[in-house]
């Protein structure tokens, strides 16, 4: 689906921070609007104290960029904004400039479903300063959230060790699109089904569901409730067994399963939604097996996440299917990815790139200058070895050396001839889309493939091994020199 | 704005969990679809370990309910769903039933901007079981999220002690609507402006913004960058001063402010976005005051929340305006409100209400039966005294006694004649909207008024006083008897 065309009935061109428009106005007034700039979108820390992230959200970003055009009522709104002294905030000339504005940038991006690491540009936007700046906020919104949730889903899928993971989180999601975009990202991360029917319709995902406690409460007896549900869904019934007493509920489910079998149908599963899931799942499994129902699956839900799943598995819980809601769709333990969007270079009058960085007292917050590419080195066993952030504008040496940007004594030489892939792919050229968006099942398969190529030590939840990502040697030197030159200027001027 | 009509171009009738539709099908097949039911939407715990919540999201809920109608492509999608054995999941008769379905329920709700407490129904839906069940998930999504964010905003506004609070969070929000609905809820909670231009356009909020680091990086010198920005916004400039060195940035801002003054304009403010905000704001204030700019405001941002604001104030930071992003729009420290939607009663064949509850091993998770109303008692000093949850179908005694549902020894007698208000107001009758939605400024004013009526001890962040909320005596007895009768049935049957 096209989320701007099919989901939203309105122009999303004002879906940005006001400062993007005030800066646009300033660039326009200062004659800098068309000056060529490069921006990089990246995050600084893996979410969930993990060892990786799974990038997602590019399809939404592509659709947003394709649709970028100010509607007449967007322009009327901008014309209506007033300054502190009551004048119009924006001159008419600028409104007219926006009216004819078309997106003409080059965009390079890492495909969705790729395993990525801190400081690697996920998106690079090259083009007129005004445009490249304007898209900062929406790109961050769309990429930050879906990358966060896809990563959470990948972790949960890993914890489930091949069991079916279903997403049940809509009721606790952050808004309508917090549910829809989350369902999409969860699928990219590895879940196989969602309860969200609109996501099923719009994205083509499998939809799954059981029933609520209220179904049971609508009947006099739990057993009758199960029977009636099974009449509607003879081969698709998953009974929620904990409305009154969980193990009594399992016994009622078994009675109904026996009746179903006499009619040639099989109960699909039972769901546990409260209590001690290890104890209850083991007891339920025993009851079901003893009654001749070894294939009835046990679904568990109740504020689960990767840590609880891993723990339940360690305790010997007999759960086949995991229904994950709140903690997945909100990424409860870290509900935001701190992605940023920083200028890397600006073309000067002579046509040369002038490299730019934002200084910070914290080294981790100092941005990397350049027109950056991410080169991933891959071993003969098809495992990821290391990633190099390099300046695409510079010729690269045969023998690559990467340097940890935050500890310059930490270096890694890449043997000559090591196979590599450049992760940033052309997506737009001169505002025209040149990238064929893969299907969601293709993206999901890519995530699985990428995770297999990442060493398990970097995938574990507790103190994961830090996958090596470094700056290419000449880029490291250029950054260092730029930092020192800024610091010198400061020292001289203070 | 109408969020379904103006924002979404598609039917939202499938914005629900699949199990709502499978239960609908089951009710339809069992002849229970039109049986009259009552459901209550409530949460069990105040968010953020606080002493209250501010309810929000009703306008979205009303618009969703008004638009509830399955489109032909919704129905085509539902018809396409298959059971495990390959048949159609839903019979054609049911699809036809959905085609002609119109929302005919009664809905009562607590107005947005009302201070609310755990276990109080925020919304009560009365009507045909199938319909009342179907709307569970979207009502929860819409009310949970906005209530959570309005509450967070109220806490942050309280911490800011009258300073201007602005919402800057779009880039870290959970999806498009995670940003838009959050901006709305933040306004309800007390913030005065947002950076989100689309929210400004759609909701009519004041929009505010400064500029990014990239603005400064686009020029050779910081001072030149400030000058150029001030040329575009002579009376609305807020300079971000920390691109290279914060206090040098303040000095550059002062130089430009002096030039502006010679032209008859005044610098509006400076923004600090990193470092020790207490030290930097005090030093910046000193530099500005000494240079003759006591009215230049100091805006601070950088992962702030109510705790950091309170702490910065205690340390003597000189900040006038707070730009709050991530931690506000995602409610970072608790990114979901655990709202639930439970059946309270079902009409039997004789036309009498049969009261219903969901049992749980945890007393806090056992629902309250009845057709509930929330009665708030108010002192002569116009302060909130206590809230009573009562069964509207029962006559109420003159002398009210409320009993803590989780500690029956905890009781409070309300003196006869104490003034009261019933919080649940008629919103729909027979599917027709009978409630005039207040404007957002009216809702914001209501929040402020309500918070003034709540004792400060219940508003504080650390170990707030628990505001008394109890069940009306006869309701308490009815609930107790119902729990005991279920437990007895269980004991007998096991």
Image: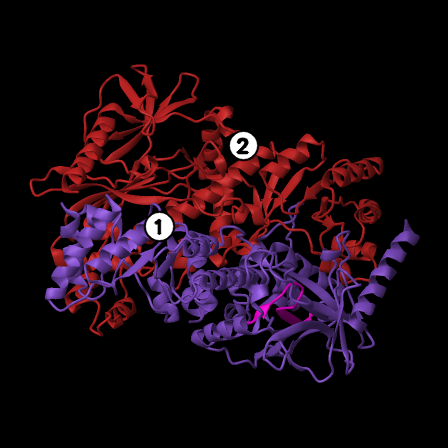
Chain colours: A red, B purple
Residue A280 spot, x, y in % from top left: 77, 41
Q: Is residue A93 above or below residue B273?
A: below
Q: Is residue B218 magenta?
A: no
The reply to whether the magenta stretch includes residue B124 is yes
- Along the viewing direction, whichever of B339 and A84 lies nearer the viewer: A84
Q: CA distance from mark 1 to mark 2?
A: 34 Å
Q: With B263 as the anchor, is A356 left or right in this view?
A: right
Most foreground residue, A181 or B344: B344
Residue behind mark 2:
A461
Q: Which residue occupies 12% across, 60% down?
A: B259
**Residue that lies at the very extreme toward the bottom in this rendered image:** B417
Give, as a single range, the part of the protein colored magenta.
B113-128
Q: Looking at the image, which residue is at 37% across and 52% down? A: B171
For label 1, the residue is: B277
Mark 1: few/some/many CA within 10 Å (<14, 14-19, 20+): many
Q: Position of residue A122 (x, y in %)?
A: 34, 39
**Does residue B468 show up?**
yes
Q: Is label 1 or label 2 in front?
A: 1
Q: Is residue A63 visible?
A: no
Chain ID of residue with mark 1 = B
Q: Is residue A51 above or below residue B487?
A: above
Crowding around mark 2 (Cα neighbors within 10 Å: few <14, some 14 to 19, many 20+) is: some
Q: Secondary structure at mark 1?
A: helix
State the SS at label 2: loop
On-image quarter of the N terminus of chain B = bottom left
């Amino acid at each position: 689906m096209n989320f701007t065309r099919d989901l939203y009935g309105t122009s999303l061109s004002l879906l940005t921070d006001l400062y993007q428009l005030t800066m646009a106005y300033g660039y326009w007034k200062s004659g800098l609007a068309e000056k060529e700039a490069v921006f990089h979108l990246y995050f600084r820390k893996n979410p969930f104290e993990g060892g990786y992230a799974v990038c997602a959200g590019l399809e939404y970003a592509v659709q947003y960029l394709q649709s970028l055009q100010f509607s007449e009522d967007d322009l009327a709104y901008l014309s209506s904004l007033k300054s502190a002294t009551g004048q119009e905030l924006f001159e008419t000339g600028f409104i007219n400039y926006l009216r004819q504005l078309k997106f003409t940038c080059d965009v390079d991006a890492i495909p969705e479903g790729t395993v990525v690491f801190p400081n690697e540009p996920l998106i690079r936007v090259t083009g007129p300063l005004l445009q490249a700046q304007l898209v900062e906020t929406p790109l961050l919104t769309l990429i930050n959230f879906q990358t966060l949730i896809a990563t959470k889903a990948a972790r949960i899928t890993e914890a489930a060790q091949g069991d079916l993971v279903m997403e049940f989180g809509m009721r606790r999601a952050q808004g309508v699109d917090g549910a829809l975009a989350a369902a999409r990202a969860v699928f990219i991360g590895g879940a196989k089904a969602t309860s969200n029917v609109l996501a099923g319709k719009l994205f083509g995902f499998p939809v799954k569901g059981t029933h609520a406690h209220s179904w049971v409460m609508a009947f006099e007896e739990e057993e009758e409730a199960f029977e009636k549900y099974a009449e509607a869904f003879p081969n698709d019934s998953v009974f929620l067994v904990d409305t009154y007493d969980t193990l009594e509920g399992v016994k009622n489910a078994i009675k109904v399963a026996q009746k179903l079998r006499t009619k040639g149908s099989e109960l699909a599963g039972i769901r546990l939604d409260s209590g001690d899931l290890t104890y209850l799942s083991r007891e339920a499994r025993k009851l079901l097996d003893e009654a001749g129902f070894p294939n009835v699956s046990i679904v568990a839900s109740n504020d689960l996440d990767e840590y609880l799943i891993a723990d339940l598995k360690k305790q010997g819980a007999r759960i086949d299917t995991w229904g994950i809601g709140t903690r997945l769709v909100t990424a409860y333990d870290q509900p935001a990815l701190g992605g940023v969007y920083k200028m890397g270079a600006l073309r000067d009058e002579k046509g040369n790139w002038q490299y730019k960085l934002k200084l910070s007292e914290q080294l981790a917050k100092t941005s990397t200058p350049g027109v950056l590419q991410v080169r991933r080195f891959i071993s003969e066993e098809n495992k990821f070895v290391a990633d190099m952030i390099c300046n695409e504008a510079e010729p690269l040496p045969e023998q690559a050396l990467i340097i940890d940007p935050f500890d310059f004594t930490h270096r890694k030489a890449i043997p000559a001839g090591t196979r590599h892939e450049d992760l940033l792919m052309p997506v737009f050229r001169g505002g025209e889309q040149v990238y064929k968006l893969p299907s969601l099942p293709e993206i999901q398969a890519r995530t699985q493939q990428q995770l297999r190529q990442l060493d398990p030590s970097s995938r574990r939840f507790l103190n994961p091994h830090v996958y090596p990502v470094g700056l290419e040697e000449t880029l490291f030197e250029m950054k260092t020199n730029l930092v020192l030159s800024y610091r010198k200027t400061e020292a001289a001027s203070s």
